[in-house]
Amino acid sequence: MLKLNSVTVNYGKYSAVRQIDIEVSEGEIVVLLGANGAGKTTTFKTISGLLKPTGGTVNFEGAPINGKSPDRIVQAGIVQCAEDRKLFPQMSVQQNLMMGGYIHRSKKTQLKESLKEVYELFPILYDKRDESARLLSGGQQQMLAIGRALMAKPKLMLLDEPSIGLAPLVVEQMFTSIQHINKDGTTILLAEQNANAALSIADKGYVFENGRIVIEGTSEELFSNDEIRKAYIGA
Ligand code: ATP
């Protein structure tokens, strides 16, 4: 479904991502692991069209998307949910969700159906639909960010550090919700520092170090890799 082939991304002369190859098949949950600054967010921004690769190609469903505008990439079916959530704090929960459905502007029934699905997934958002987004807890704001991304009915969702800043119990709920979203038919590419939680729901993963992919494998392989356990799982 998504294929990055030898992708390099520079900020000026600095290569933040170097010749990476990533493959995500339809229906999978794939995780990018790595320390702060290893290149995960840069990779996401490149897939979603916010950054242009200096080298290599990004293909989605068989067609190149590198060089396309972020808007065209959303239309193609890839939606990014950013690390900093980027909510509209003064707007209500429901208004925030409606902003995510803008690509279905002309189809009211589609919007209604998407909204219903998001509220079924996160009932707390329905209870708080008229409250300002800024009044939500961290976990609820993350649900809202994910819910807003879902409103666009993506084929592939990019989730950048959904567990950041959340209490352990909330992290667990968040990962269960991500599994539900995946089972409902959305392919997921996830960047996480919480390797334990991420690998427990992922099919496979890639480990970034200084802009390069140094290890890749199925979740089972990564779980049983001593280096990974020491660096990211702490066992
Ligand atoms: P984090 O979890 O902190 O976002 P990351 O793995 O996503 O980490 P990136 O944000 O992709 O890492 O950063 C990769 C490298 O590129 C880092 O060395 C970072 O300092 C650098 N970098 C990121 N954004 C810019 C920018 N706008 N200009 C210059 N360098 C940048």
Image (cartoon, rainbow, N blue to C red):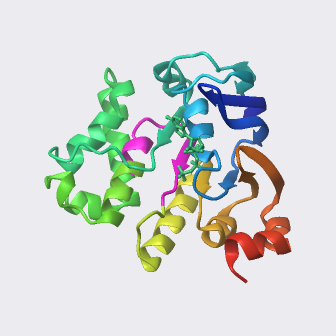
Residue at the outermost bottom position? 235
Q: Which residue is drawn at 35% across and 33% down?
A: 101
Quarter containing the N terminus: top right
Q: Nearer the viewer, residue 113 or 103?
A: 103
Residue 48 on the magenta segment: no
Q: Nearer the viewer, residue 98 or 38?
A: 38
Quarter containing the C terminus: bottom right
Residue at the outermost front position? 13
- Total tally of numbered discs in the picture: 0
Q: What stretch is highlighted in magenta?
A: 147-162
Residue 67 vertical placement versus 127 (above, below) = above
Q: In this view, does 127 lie to the left or right of 172?
A: left
Q: Quadrant of residue 43?
A: top right
Q: Which residue is drawn at 71% across and 43% down?
A: 211
Instruction: Tell me if I can see residue 3 in this picture.
Output: yes
- The quarter of the picture showing ligand 1: top right
Q: Residue at x 37, y 57 (%)?
A: 143
Q: Is residue 99 left or right of residue 135?
A: right
Q: Nearer the viewer, residue 104 or 37?
A: 37
Tell me where residue 189 appears, x and y as whole percent. Answer: 63, 47
Residue 159 vertical placement versus 229 (above, below) = above
Tell me where residue 26 appears, x and y as whole percent. Answer: 71, 42
